[in-house]
Amino acid sequence: MPSSGIRITDAYEQQRDEVRRSLPSLLAGNRRRAISKALGDLYAEDQAEILSELTPEQRETALRFLGERLLPEALTHFEPSLLLEVVSCLAKSRFASMLTSLQTDDLVELFELLPLDKRRKAMDLLVPRTRLLVKQGLGYSEDSAGRLMRREIASVPEHWSVGQVIDYFRARRSGFSDSVQTREAFYTIILVSSGFRPIGTVQVSRLLGATRTTLVSAITDQEMHLVDADMHTDKVANLFHKYGLVELPVVDVNGRLCGSITADDVVEVIEERNEEDIFNLAGVSSHDFYADIGRVLLSRVPWLSLNLITAFLASSVVAKFSTAIEQLVALAVLMPIVASMGGNAGTQTLAVTVRSLALQRITGRNVRRLVGKECLISVISGLFFATLTGVGALLWFDDAALAVVIVVAMSCNIILGGFVGVCMPISLQRLDQDPAVGSSILLTTCTDIFGFFSFLGLAAWILL
Amino acid sequence: MPSSGIRITDAYEQQRDEVRRSLPSLLAGNRRRAISKALGDLYAEDQAEILSELTPEQRETALRFLGERLLPEALTHFEPSLLLEVVSCLAKSRFASMLTSLQTDDLVELFELLPLDKRRKAMDLLVPRTRLLVKQGLGYSEDSAGRLMRREIASVPEHWSVGQVIDYFRARRSGFSDSVQTREAFYTIILVSSGFRPIGTVQVSRLLGATRTTLVSAITDQEMHLVDADMHTDKVANLFHKYGLVELPVVDVNGRLCGSITADDVVEVIEERNEEDIFNLAGVSSHDFYADIGRVLLSRVPWLSLNLITAFLASSVVAKFSTAIEQLVALAVLMPIVASMGGNAGTQTLAVTVRSLALQRITGRNVRRLVGKECLISVISGLFFATLTGVGALLWFDDAALAVVIVVAMSCNIILGGFVGVCMPISLQRLDQDPAVGSSILLTTCTDIFGFFSFLGLAAWILL
């Protein structure tokens, strides 16, 4: 465990980077004690990060030398591809003791990454009550509030006074070991009725300032949000973002309090969702920073394959107009401009729409307004850039008819790009599909095919 | 203010959507009381959201009818383009009273959006102490921890006992009005030395469970992070993400405690940074959901203009090979495939690199490994897709030499795309530039120009 007391972030990071730098040579020298001290003094997150950067052999040695000083929380910070390897390096008894000092939300996160057989074995290492809670947690669907919440809740009966609450927590605490105390931080106390239904929340800091005789029900927060355990975590994340929440109670299907989600878990959900959106728009299925090259290729090849197919499709459109190109080679020169501008304008609209959908800014009422606005923007920028391009083409090739053809084709293509960019993600979402997956390839397929077809088709019809 | 007590999120959202739906007709009927009740019962965030969706005339009427029931926090939830309009609808006395019930971090956020003259006037409405704190906050550079932190801190001398802390907060509280109590939530108490230097933190919930005689210094957290006021907010956000923080104390240049950042503010920073990355990769400078069409066009036209210029550049490469195309029109048919595959493979690498940079996963040590890995991936997928394309071209045009040309050109172009995709954002970052801004256009410029040049050039050299 890190030496207690204050850790100025800059100084700590220097220490960590020094460990990162010196570790390979310490490992080469088999310096057991130095390694145990160096890695053992770091936070769990950095232990996991630095161990992840090693080769499998180095990692195995480092884990052996580190021994008991590998923090339990470190387990939850390995990328899925490494977790199993790390777990199999641990002695069973050590793994068991690490599991007992994790909170239920961390345990659920950890167990969902383990393959089924390993999961069953690890489950046997838990005490029955925790095992039940973890099993219940895993019973909720992936990406639901139920998976994200922790089961350790600070709840008290609604009729208690501040003094009773304080006495209750003092008595409860004395039964716990020190390590549990530290991690069992909560920010809100939830008032429950006799049926364990939440009826209000009190900020712990507010409780601290109230007199002992005050009824907790008299100092409840004026805002209280409450969600069902089956709410999607994206929606949970948007609630935290929108309302600036720090803790959010969760109820089961019967309306009974069953858990609580804190802001630190939500930060992770938000980063994951954003990563997904960025990667989906760029045609990467998933990304695991420490994955080997085979896995990385697997996450990218499908989209490149799809792109290859659509590129051949677009080329087949060009092939239809071979004769026109032979007669007027300027068509081959200018056609990439038409396709590219349509694709780029559409990508802008697509990114804005995907983002608005992710933040649930698009409601039934303003969807028509958004579509209208984006289409109008496409029309204006389509006409503007098409005219500019037309002037360019005229100066370059001194062919007025060709300039007219490119103006018409490009403005139509930019307008199409904008239309597809806004409508496709909205439609995908309505069909319960992820609006970001595949949409950028579909979009450029549309603008490439239509761009080539409209430009070459018009040219063949008008010019030749 | 919302009617107090519990608000099940689903039920509340139905109520809010009903308000959103019915508001235009209530406004048309000038139903002052119904509007005041409907909007007044909503949370600040939804008041701002629904008001934002109205036309300026409707908004002015709604604000007038809403009067005192517009929550002070709502001011911090308007997009910049609307804030000034809303403020100018408010009576000066009302605006002043709203300002006094905001916390310093909200005030700083609000003031930075006001134009300078309006800012000066609004500053005069604050009490001197708050004015000083807000001015100090605005004195920190944009996107720094100092701008983000709030100045209201819960700090106590290191030698106090739990009982003394509780008594202190009880005594302090009695001097505050109810509304201040509610918002002044804190999650951590910071122990300071006589020089106001932070020397440890205690979770409020932990304090609650300790006996009165316990020294607070005996129950400090084992992890404590502490940052300088001039740290960039992106770095702050990464600390919250990595270490699962809920509150982070901030010190000034002299090491004295000067503020504190909470997870709810960080969620906003993270969403903004991610939005920027998504938009930058798609070539959108900034996005304001409620901005008028003129502003939206301004945020997109620069990138489209740059794209037009680069598209003409790429076309000029094609033009150089007009003779080759006239002789073998299959070149015009196949050249978009070469360019497109290079661009897409590069975009995948680019997205992964930009994301890794944003999360500060790339350290000095692993940058070479990352570049090597991405280049290797490009080589493998380049050879694979180029061969596939070669086979396709052979089947289509029955020309072995043409197939060889496309295999060579495309594999080189995909490798180039991967290389540029990983090296360009890293170089931009080293030059202190945003690695996402402009990089996708620069990338496709490279792959378009090189794709056309290598394919047509090789073809002209070998085939003709």
Image (cartoon, coloured by chain):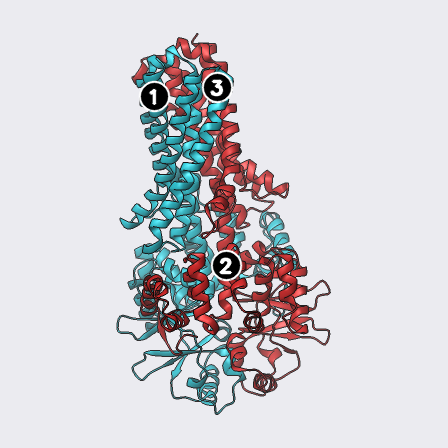
Chain colours: A red, B cyan
Residue at x 37%, y 64% (from the top left corner): A27
Q: Quadrant of residue A174?
A: bottom right
Q: What element carries label 2?
A: helix
Q: Mark 3 lies on which chain?
A: B
Residue A132 locus on image (x, y percent)? 68, 69
Is there a contact, CB below 8 Å, between mark 3 and mark 2? no
The crowding category of the residue bearing disc 3, from other C-alpha atoms within 10 Å (few below 14, some 14 to 19, many at least 20), is: some
- From mark 3 to mark 1, how far is it between C-alphas? 16 Å
Residue at x 41%, y 63% (from the top left corner): B239
Q: Is mark 3 on a helix, strand or loop?
A: helix
Q: Out of B255 and B359, give the one closest to the viewer.
A: B359
Residue B458: give its label: 1
Looking at the rendered image, the disc whose residue lies closer to the viewer, 1 or 2, is 1
Q: Which residue, given by chain and number where applicable, does mark 3 sit on?
A: B394
Would residue A144 be visible to someone looking at this image? yes
Q: Which residue, given by chain and number where applicable, does mark 2 sit on?
A: A268
Q: Out of A12 and B458, give the one closest to the viewer.
A: B458
Q: What residue type is labelled 1?
A: Leu
Q: Out of B238 and A58, give the one closest to the viewer.
A: A58
- From mark 1 to mark 2, how far is it between C-alphas? 49 Å
Left or right position of B321 against A160: left
Q: Is mark 1 on a helix, strand or loop?
A: helix
Are the numbered discs 3 and 2 placed on the same chain, yes or no?
Answer: no
Q: Which amino acid does label 2 sit on?
A: Glu
Mark found first going from the N terminus, 3 or 1: 3
Q: Mark 2 lies on which chain?
A: A
Looking at the rendered image, the disc whose residue lies closer to the viewer, 3 or 2, is 3
